[in-house]
Amino acid sequence: MRFTTFLFDLDDTLYPPSTGLWGAIAGRINRYMIEQMGFPPEQVVALREQYFREYGTTLRGLQARHHVDTDGYLAFVHDVPLAEYIHPDPELRGALAGLPGRKFIFTNADRGHAGRVVKTVGLEGLFDGVIDVHTIAPYCKPMPEAFQLALQAAGDPEPRTCVLLDDQARITRAGRAAGLFTVLVGKDSAADGEADACLPRLADLPGLLQGII
């Protein structure tokens, strides 16, 4: 087996973007900035886009510029009724359960949110650990340092033996630069350098790997 370690993104990767869950979380981020931090509503969208570009996530931008209460922020933005958006996925569970090697969640969210999502999608017991926003602090995906810390947390495997699965091309591009085999999830194609492979449905991962090895 060429690959020994799998790093799975969480939101919009372990479940399809069509569920609307990430949209609900984004709405909570907007509310936090307005209600808890006092930003004018008309400035929030532009600020989030600026921080996303400059720092990787809204949270990292708020930490750098405004000394946000990180734990309070994470608790607020993830306070979403998950079961209204996502549901158990037996097909995905079977596909991931059959993968040889170690499996980790690698997310810019926190461990608590990851655990709730994994349980709601019916994937509990399949992962060897969660590499979250605290594990890779003060960095986040797609920063190169975040990948270094993630590999350390996963037991220092050789990058070439690791598969990174993410729904964002900026992150698969960075993972590829770090030496990982990258899969852009939820897409039929990718521009040059964005990823090593594309996978419209995560449940089809075993078939993709068979075609590679």
Image: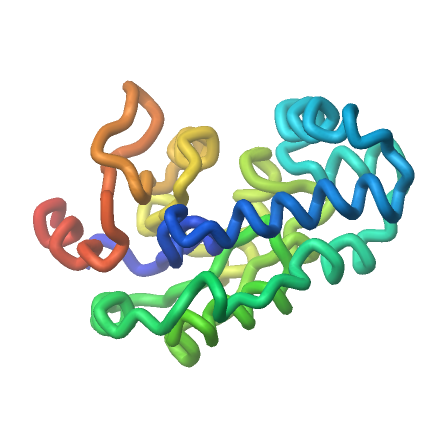
162 relative to 78, above or below:
above
199 relative to 73, above or below:
above
**From this viewpoint, which residue is outermost toward the top?**
192
Q: Is residue 183 visible?
A: no
98 relative to 208, above or below:
below
Q: Where residue 181 sits in the image (x, y, percent)? A: 31, 41
Q: Where residue 101 sits in the image (x, y, percent)? A: 30, 66
Q: Quadrant of the N terminus?
A: bottom left
Q: Quadrant of residue 153?
A: bottom right
Query: Is 98 or 45 nearer to us in this picture?
Result: 45
125 relative to 84, above or below:
below
Q: Where residue 204 sits in the image (x, y, percent)? A: 18, 55
Query: Is 104 or 49 nearer to us in this picture?
Result: 49
On the rendered structure, is 125 left or right of 67? left
Query: Is 17 or 111 nearer to us in this picture?
Result: 17
On the rendered structure, is 131 left or right of 13? right
Residue drawn at x 47%, y 75% is: 119
Residue drawn at x 26%, y 74% is: 90
Q: Is residue 113 visible?
A: yes
Query: Is 187 or 134 nearer to us in this picture?
Result: 187
Q: How many marks?
A: 0
Residue drawn at x 47%, y 55% is: 10
On the rendered structure, is 114 left or right of 39? left
Q: Where residue 28 sits in the image (x, y, percent)? A: 69, 49
